[in-house]
Amino acid sequence: MTTVIPQRIVFTRPVCDYCFKEDKWLVHALNDLHGIKVCEEHFVDGQRDVKAWFHTNDMVLIEDLLKVYDLPRVGILVPRSNGSFTEGGELVCSSVKNQFVHKNSNGDWVVMVSFLGLQKEINIKILCGDAYGVVEHLERGFYKDEYDSVKDLTVSTSTFKHDGLQEVYVPGTGVVRMLIMPPPPSTKN
């Protein structure tokens, strides 16, 4: 059994990332450009592997979180630059573009909220406090079961490998790959 890491899905061959069949195929997408291509036979494997990747990258689909927790979607308190809070934010939930709860650079779980025509990330504790146990669930690992089921599997060879290639999640953009090249050899004598 193998696992697949989500990767760029545009301008690639339309084949299943598990068995390389060119039949009907579907995509488990992170966004418009990245995901896992699967045939009907590997549909469940694709779901599992995307969720395991989310776990590894401290991300949870907002739609999955809303299936478990009854979080407010409107009337959300939005922090202002002067330190006060204004009610009126709306949770950004789009069926077209996946929206995530994710850890920011400070290690806080944040969610995207729309307020006065702008989108702003807010700490999930502002959204729900600690009443639901959401933060504890996120810290334990929302997709931990999927991650545990794949951590010892072999990664499919369909994933491009390079020593300097790193995948990075950029909020609002999605997954990007960066090539970090080693410094050139010194020419000093």
Image (spheres, rainbow, N blue to C red):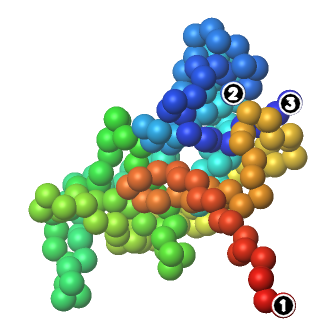
Q: Residues within 10 Å of mark 3 (few under 14, many from 20)?
A: few
Q: Quadrant of the C terminus?
A: bottom right
Q: Residue at x 42, y 59 (%)?
A: 171
Mark 3 = which residue? Answer: 1
Q: Which mark is residue 189?
A: 1
Place of residue 98 in the rendered image (x, y in percent of width and height, measured from the top left): 42, 43
Spatial CA distance of label 1 from label 2 is: 49 Å
Residue 112: image quadrant is: bottom left
Q: Earlier in the sequence, mark 1 or mark 2?
A: 2
User: Which amino acid, mark 1?
Assistant: Asn
Residue 182: image quadrant is: bottom right
Q: Residues within 10 Å of mark 2 (few under 14, many from 20)?
A: many
Q: Which mark is residue 177?
A: none
Between 90 and 30, the residue placed more toward the observer is 30
Q: Residue furthest front?
A: 189
Mark 1 vs mark 2, foreground winner is: 1
Question: In the rendered structure, are the residues bearing label 3 and label 1 in contact, judged by CB atoms less than 8 Å apart?
Answer: no
Q: Secondary structure at mark 2?
A: loop
User: Which amino acid, mark 2?
Assistant: Asp
Please tell me how many numbered marks the rendered image carries. Answer: 3
Tell me if I can see residue 153 in this picture.
yes
Image height of 39 relative to 131, above or below: above
User: Which amino acid, mark 3?
Assistant: Met
Mark 2 = which residue? Answer: 17
Q: Residue at x 38, y 55 (%)?
A: 172
Q: Residue at x 23, y 70 (%)?
A: 77
Between 2 and 79, the residue placed more toward the observer is 2
